[in-house]
Amino acid sequence: MHHSLVAARRRLAFVLPSVPTILVFLAVPAHAAGAAAIDRGNTAWVLVASALVLFMTLPGLGLFYGGLVRARNLLSVLMHCFAICSIVSVIWLLFGYSLVFGDSSPLLGGLSKCFLAGIADNVHRPQIPEYAFVLFQMTFAVITPALTIGAFTERVRFSFVIGFTVLWLVIVYLPVAHWVWGGGWLAQRGVIDFAGGIVVHITAGVSALVAAILIGARRGFPHSLIPPHSPGLTMAGGGMLWFGWFGFNGGSALAADGSAASAILATHFAAAAASLTWMAIEWLRASKPTSVGLVTGAVAGLATITPASGYVGPMGALVIGIVAGAACFHVTGFIKQRLRIDDSLDVFAVHGVGGMVGALLVAIFALPALGGVGYASGMSMGRQIAAQAIGVAAAAAWSIVATFVIVKLLAAVTGLRVSPEEESDGLDLATHGERAYDHG
């Protein structure tokens, strides 16, 4: 961009070699000089990918989660997703983006980009407006705390959800995102996370498990089964998540190029393999394959391939998907049946475990001999595995400690649970005064 600016001055000086020339140059808008550096194809793809990722939350995740709860709580789940989107978006504008991508220290970004000041005309790599990068990263910040609500649906106060979203975003998500994506200490140690296995899925999954333990189970759990009220909604939402995940992973290339195409292809194969694996295990164990099992397996595959999607080949993605389907299926049963923790919608088993598995397996399947793109200079498979293990452990440990403090604080300030009567009546009517259906 600097060289094009010098060339522009020389051309103007040649055509209008006078004082008015200077005035003409100064009158040119600041963004005009940078406009030539913008790649329209890359910019268009990142903008579309941003819309796809937002679509994952609204309405994809809302419908996926909403179909899994009882009919009397559908609107509460949708309310949570919409409110979280609005809250996170405002925080992202005010200071969230700056604390992740501002002037950095190893632990947290600076305040230089608060209110998105001074970035309107910036060009981000690779030749996209920084505004486009802000938008794309904001959609990740939106969906991450929204994932956690699946662990404590049908029993918490709406005020708790709001307070938890604000505190969790600031204390957990923003620092970890900076550590990995903002040039923080994990990035400096060589940790790789293409689209959020560590930043998104591990933080959300581990925090969800801690919150579920501290808040306690729904009434009747584990003795009374709480079946999904609408597997059809869940499958529709799951399809939207699969569709949107192409933007989630493919958009993380930040360019309309081969890396994006490879990431999308890997994403699709992993989801397909995981869904079939989950369905096969369920079919063998229960004699019937279920729609909820099939779609949950797909989401497990999508979460697991996320950190690896831009680094592995198609066959590596297929293997990762198979491992994801088997691992997440067994952890789901272990959490609910053996540990008797009411992680209502299996956030830890699907997202937390999936993120961990994917973040570790990327160090293996990035090997060129296995179809991967290789390692950064100075890294080998062994060093990459060590770096990934540190990243997984650090994100999980910070999520555990911070979430424990946040939930305990909110328990004293807002309270955690609704009354037994309100839980029985359903949060739609008790909290919001509305019903999703005339009957249910």
Image: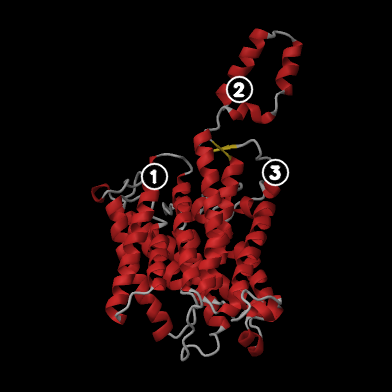
On the rendered structure, is 269 left or right of 210?
A: left
Q: Secondary structure at mark 1?
A: helix
Label 2 crowd bin: few (<14), some (14–19), many (20+), radius 10 Å? few
The residue that mark 1 highlights is 261
Tell me the amino acid under the disc marked 3. Answer: Ala
Tell me which amino acid carries mark 2: Leu
Residue type indicated by callout 1: Ala
* In this rendering, position of residue 78 left or right of residue 201: right
For image coordinates 64% across by 85% down, the residue present is 425
Q: Quadrant of residue 19?
A: top right
Mark 1 and mark 2 in contact? Answer it, CB < 8 Å.
no
Numbered mark located on residue 117 in the image: 3
Mark 1 and mark 2 lie on one chain; the one further toward the N terminus is 2
**Residue 5's disc number:** 2
Distance between the alpha carbons at the discs numbered 1 and 2: 33 Å
Distance from disc 2 to disc 3, alpha carbons, whole Å, reads 23 Å
User: Does residue 19 appear in the picture of this structure?
Assistant: yes
Q: Quick one: SS at disc 3? A: loop
Q: From the viewer's side, name the closer residue of 379 and 144.
A: 144
- How far from the left and from the top, in percent, is residue 330? 34, 76
Crowding near pointer 1: few (<14 within 10 Å), some, many (20+)? some
- Residue displayed at 33% across by 47% down: 375
Q: Is residue 336 above or below residue 4?
A: below
Q: Is residue 213 above or below residue 375?
A: below
Residue 23, image x, y percentages:
75, 17
